[in-house]
Amino acid sequence: MTAVTTPWRERARRLAGELADEGVLRSPEWRDAIETVPRHVFVPRFHTQRPDGRWSETGTGSPEWLDQVYRNQPLITALASTPRGNQVTVSSSTKPGLMIRMLEALRIEDTHRVLEIGTGTGYNAGLLAHRLGDDQVCSVDIAADLVAAARTRLHELDLHPTLTVAHGGAGLPDEAPFDRIIATCSVSAIPSSWVEQVRDGGLILADLKRTVHAGNLVLLTRHGDRLEGRFLPRWAGFMAMRESDEAPPDLSVDVTVEVGDRSTTGLPPHPWDSLIPWLLAHSRLPSRLTFGYRGTGAHRWAVFTANDGSWCAVAVNSSGGRREVRQYGDVRIWDEFEKAHEQWQNLDEPGWDRFGLTVAADGSHRIWLDDPGGTRSWPLAPTRQ
Ligand SMILES: C[S@@+](CC[C@H](N)C(=O)[O-])C[C@H]1O[C@@H](n2cnc3c(N)ncnc32)[C@H](O)[C@@H]1O
């Protein structure tokens, strides 16, 4: 076992205490896991983005490393370069409070077999294997180097869950069925393989995100060939599932703000200010929108693009409470968002705790308010998954 010294144990106990005080950590089993499995073994270094956009690395040699590792914060652990040379994050150690919130929500019992999608550093697989034993935990990641590093760290701690390099969208058929599936990367639709590989009555906890932050963690129960459940009350976001172990492509849609149709809006331009309306808007929007910024200063635009070439740009700065909007192409992205926002306001702005999701046997996804059989529901446009 790696240097198991008093300083990290005290820090791990303090972290567990903070999570318990917050009401996130409730069960003695997960408290024991947080206090016993050393996060620092899984995060020998992490990356921080500086205000000028560049990244710096903090590692074992740095005086603040151990303190940072035992804070309740996510830590970025892997970067990759896009074709245009931008550095993007491809793996991280999830915020411990979020990890525990998910493990508690899954109501895991000692006999359960669990599949994790997104091994990353291996820390969460370590928490699971400590609690359940090696034979009951499987974890997959698309990145071979991450899986190899996670395996080495787990073995140092005498933990031996089944780790596999695989596209998590296919699950892990050879090890199915599972009592629980937990995904630590987001998906735009729940893959049918997960429905097949969780036992009837079993639970799937995943981050369902259409684009631009539109979505949240959802806890689904398998009922025969369909899934149903509610979104968790607090919003959280994971990095998106990748199709291969490469950096995601750069934005490719050509946006010339001057050619778009003009209007104005009173709504905020950033998707994270209106998460639920953006999700509801996806019943009429293509599944894959991208979001980014163009321009600087007074000419800075928040830009949403669809893969058919349609886009909208919303001025970041407002004048008299209104912002300029430009829209281009067949998909009127901002108009659809405004309609969904108005509908949500007319419903008295319900929070995530009132929304749920049904995934039907044919794979179609439907968001509903309060009651799966009620009148308020929003089918999501199909995706490729
Ligand atoms: C937030 S990190 C996971 C954190 C991890 N659970 C931990 O405890 O360190 C998300 C991970 O999802 C992985 N991932 C992305 N796309 C994937 C895919 N298609 N299949 C499996 N894993 C994928 C990434 O490589 C990344 O390591």
Image: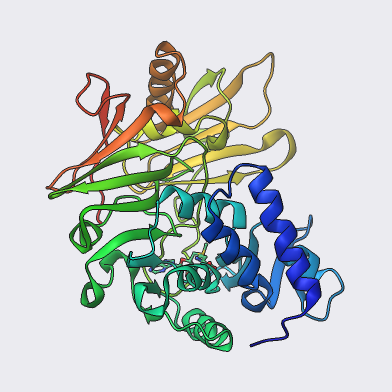
Q: In this view, does 48 lie to the left or right of 36?
A: right
Q: Is residue 243 left or right of residue 43?
A: left
- Residue 364, placed above or below residue 173: above
Where in the figure is residue 234, as x and y percent of width and height? 52, 37
Q: Residue sitting at 49 percent across and 86 percent down?
A: 148
Where in the figure is residue 353, as x and y percent of width and height? 43, 30
Where in the figure is residue 58, as x and y percent of width and height? 77, 72
Q: Residue sitting at 32 percent across and 25 percent down?
A: 369
Colour convention of the picture: rainbow
Quadrant where the N terminus is found in the figure: bottom right
- Residue 297, placed above or below residue 226: above
- Residue 131, placed above or below residue 235: below
Q: In this view, does 269 lie to the left or right of 163?
A: right
The mark total stands at 0
Q: Residue sitting at 48 percent across and 71 percent down?
A: 125
Viewer-side residue, 381 vs 164: 164
Can residue 187 be seen? yes
